[in-house]
Amino acid sequence: MTQTVLLAGATGMLGSQIARCLLDQPDARVRLLVRGGDAGKRAALDPLLARGAEIIEGDLADRASLDRATRGVDVIVSAVQGGPDVIIDGQVALAEAGRRNGVRRILPSDFALDLFKATPGEHMVFDLRRAADERIAATGIEHVHVLQGGFMDLFKPGAGVIGGDGVVRFWGDGTQPIEVTGVEDTARMTARVALDRSVGSGKFAFAGDRISILGAADVVEAQTGRMFERRPLGSEADLRAAMAAAAKDAANPLEAVMLAYQLTMLTGQTALSDLQNDRYPDLKLESFAQFAARTLPRRAAA
Ligand SMILES: NC(=O)c1ccc[n+]([C@@H]2O[C@H](COP(=O)([O-])OP(=O)(O)OC[C@H]3O[C@@H](n4cnc5c(N)ncnc54)[C@H](OP(=O)(O)O)[C@@H]3O)[C@@H](O)[C@H]2O)c1
């Protein structure tokens, strides 16, 4: 039975891929909630419109637009990014509009390690999503939390975890594995889960691989032939001290967030469990080695 899916965040890095994957599903009608203004971003949506997507102009801060967008919708997928106004106020308003208009389910913009296991106050990004998720659940709408770990894409040299300057910096001994999944695979799974009526409210976790920072560096070296210096930054106590200092540095708010991610990688506290990797037999998740082989330059033959 065809379902109508409303996607918020279709101009974004992850959302644009979810939109494409939803359009690949024969049983989905796709509607995009898009903010007006930026002509370039709108032009990027043209291929989606050509494939049948419908645009509703709106904003999570504009309640009337959320009512327009959610009428006749079965499932909402949110891939938005932002501060408390977007992640909490905006997503809760979206869920409430959905509830008013008979939407069955929402997938909030979680897309992380198991943020529900994080210690409150330690990770601002996880705190925001947990606060939003609690309020969304309280509206009574079905809610599915897609948890895929870190994006493998961030382990490409220069993308965040492994330095573009040829240095891998890590806290602890760098061997704690975390779950990771490629952005494309995350989008593919999200499109399937969104439409899968047999998935109930709660966490929906999967992961293409489990890798440590140093393990990822080994894979990148084997694939590219480029060697990376390993540079330890200190113990968990040193990291926590750096986090405390960063929390007081109002001039550089991103530093605290980046350190909080490092802490999740170091402790393994937010590890995913009950992985649903095999739920859709035709959808095989890429390992990090496969991802690296597909996306990184190959080592020159000797
Ligand atoms: N686990 C990981 O390693 C990892 C890494 C990266 C991201 N993520 C997660 O993935 C999710 C998506 O992140 P992203 O990097 O793809 O985000 P992004 O590229 O920054 O895109 C954010 C999207 O949200 C939309 N948006 C923001 N405020 C809005 C509002 N008020 N009304 C309507 N739309 C609004 C933006 O629209 P405009 O184009 O109009 O601004 C854009 O389409 C987030 O939950 C993020 O935390 C996870």
Image: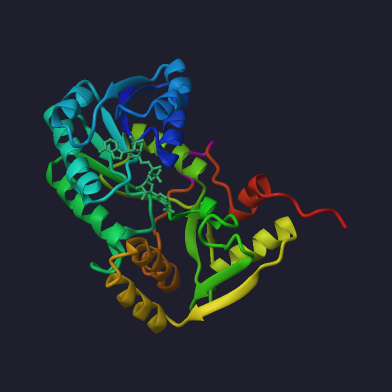
Determine the residue located farthest toward the front in the rendered image: 251
Answer above or below: position of 210 versus 73. Answer: below
Answer above or below: position of 188 versus 208. Answer: above
Quarter holding residue 70: top left
Whether residue 1 appears in this view of the structure is no
Q: Examine the structure image and report whether residue 163 is included in the region drawn in magenta.
A: no
Please tell me which residue is depicted at 54% across the width and 78% down the height of the picture.
Answer: 232
Quarter holding residue 282: top right
Spot occupied by residue 66 in the image (x, y as percentages of width and height): 19, 29
Please tell me which residue is depicted at 27% across the width and 24% down the height of the picture.
Answer: 57
Q: Main secondary structure of the magenta part?
A: loop
Question: Over which residues does the magenta segment extend?
Answer: 278-282
Spot occupied by residue 267 in the image (x, y as percentages of width and height): 41, 73
Q: Which of these two is toward me, 199 or 81?
A: 81
Whether residue 109 appears in this view of the structure is yes
Q: Which of these two is toward me, 227 or 108?
A: 227
Numbered label tally: 0
Q: Is residue 65 left or right of residue 80?
A: left
Please tell me which residue is depicted at 30% across the width and 23% down the height of the picture.
Answer: 4
Q: Examine the structure image and report whether residue 280 is included in the region drawn in magenta.
A: yes
Spot occupied by residue 231 in the image (x, y as percentages of width and height): 58, 76
Quadrant of the drawing holding the N terminus: top left
